Image (cartoon, helix red, strand yellow):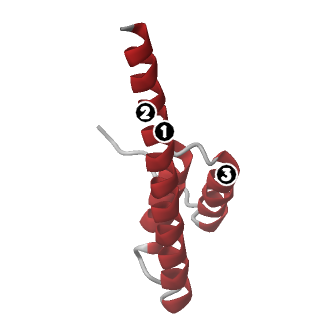
Amino acid sequence: MAHRMNLSLKKLSLNAAVDYQKAELLVSIAVETQEKFFKTVPKSNLNESLLLQVATIINRLLILKKAAIYFEKFATGYRRIRKPRML
């Protein structure tokens, strides 16, 4: 019984590793697509939200250095003083 559980855990770990690699590949494709969009349409009103979305996805995948680069681009590229809302 313990041997079966050990095999199941190994299989789950392998599957998780494969899924992580697939997700990382998809994120790479998404980032490439987003960068092409930025170059093609640099003044689009979608750039701010796209940049933040990609940074968040990369962060969730724990690719922290790359996420930090995108969050930094967001912070420096979209500095705005937002007026506080009145309640």
Which amino acid type corresponds to the residue marked 1 in the rendered image? Leu
Q: Amino acid at mark 2?
A: Lys
* Spot occupied by residue 5 in the image (x, y as percentages of width and height): 39, 16
Q: Between residue 78 and residue 81, name the one nearer to us.
A: 78
Mark 2 lies on residue: 11
Q: Name the residue at 47% across, 52% down.
A: 57
| 56 shown above or below 39 | above
Indicate the secondary structure of the residue bearing disc 2. Answer: helix
From the image, tell me which residue sits under label 1. Answer: 14
**Mark carried by residue 68:** 3
The crowd level at tag 1 (other Cα within 10 Å; few <14, some 14-19, many 20+) is: few
Amino acid bearing label 3: Ala
Circle 2: is it few (<14), some (14-19), or many (20+) Cα within 10 Å?
Answer: few
Q: How many marks?
A: 3
Indicate the quadrant where residue 81 lies: bottom right
Q: Residues within 10 Å of mark 3 (few under 14, many from 20)?
A: some
For residue 46, above or below residue 79: below
Extreme-top residue of the structure? 1
